[in-house]
Image (cartoon, rainbow, N blue to C red):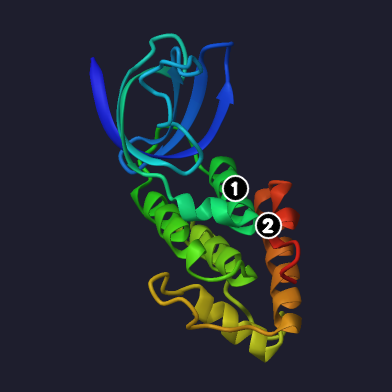
Amino acid sequence: MVERAQGLILRTRPLTDTRLIIHWLTPDFGRIATVAKGARRPQSPFRGKLDLFYLAEFSFSRSRRSELHALREVVLRETRSALREELGYLRQASYCAALIEQTTETETPLPAIFKLMADLLDYLPRQPPQPLALFAFELKLLTELGLKPDFKPGTLSAGARQVLMRAASFDWSAPGGLKLSAPQSREIEQYLHGFLIYHLGRLPPRRNAALAGMR
């Protein structure tokens, strides 16, 4: 049986000389992995359609033996080429993708998290890379996971606490609506790092790279 979905590509990796594994984030099926047979051949119908953070409509056939399903067809909808104009955008997007992979189960519907990632990818190229985007994403993801911080007085300075409370409901469609100082950025970075480690046990190693040069 062939099933259809819309998805964002979170990660790709070679399986063989000709096959590629694609890790998707979809609203209806959650995270799923597909194998694109022949995708690495020059004349493949998948050529140019499978890369990081592409948005596509695709069809697949479920495997009865594993969680790697057979990719059948891909209709590309959005490449988000602007993300590739600045390394900082890709670093932040890659960290957020890794955080989603760490904190969610496979093949479980994730409509809110799909929208969160799509909103982030749309937002990133609208201004120079900034830590606020990453902090807002972490807070929104924690909220979806039922782990929203309560920002108790005394754990943060008044200014940083106010910024975090506003970032938790940050409007991705309004770039530049929230600013934070360098000291606030360092304080929030350390606070969220500790909070995430406490609740998740570990963090994807890409977080430092995602924040590099923006502290």
Determine which of the numbered discs, if any, sits on residue 78 in the image: none
Q: Is 177 located above or below residue 88 in the figure?
A: below
Q: Is 138 located above or below residue 81 in the figure?
A: below
Image-based side of 82 in relation to 26, left or right: right
Provide the secondary structure element on which disc 1 rests. helix
> Disc 1 marks which amino acid?
Ser
Q: Is 86 located above or below residue 155 in the figure?
A: above
> Disc 2 marks which amino acid?
Ala
Residue at image location 24% in from the left, 18% down from the top: 2
Q: Dots 1 and 2: beta carbons under 8 Å?
A: yes
Residue 202 in view: no
* Badge 2 density bin: few <14, some 14–19, many ≥20, Cα 10 Å: many
Q: Position of residue 77 (x, y in %)?
A: 31, 42
In the picture of the structure, the residue carrying the numbered disc 1 is 94
In the picture of the structure, the residue carrying the numbered disc 2 is 210
Q: Using the numbered discs, state the Cα–Cα distance from disc 1 to disc 2 in whole angstroms.
A: 8 Å
Q: Position of residue 101 (x, y in %)?
A: 55, 41
Residue at image location 46% in from the left, 18% down from the top: 39
Q: Quadrant of residue 112?
A: bottom left
Quadrant containing the C terminus in the rendered view: bottom right
Which of 130 and 97 lies nearest the eye of the viewer? 130
Quadrant containing the N terminus in the rendered view: top left
Q: Quadrant of residue 122?
A: bottom left
Image-based side of 174 in relation to 93, left or right: left
Residue 32 in view: yes
Residue at image location 73% in from the left, 81% down from the top: 182
Provide the secondary structure element on which disc 2 rests. helix
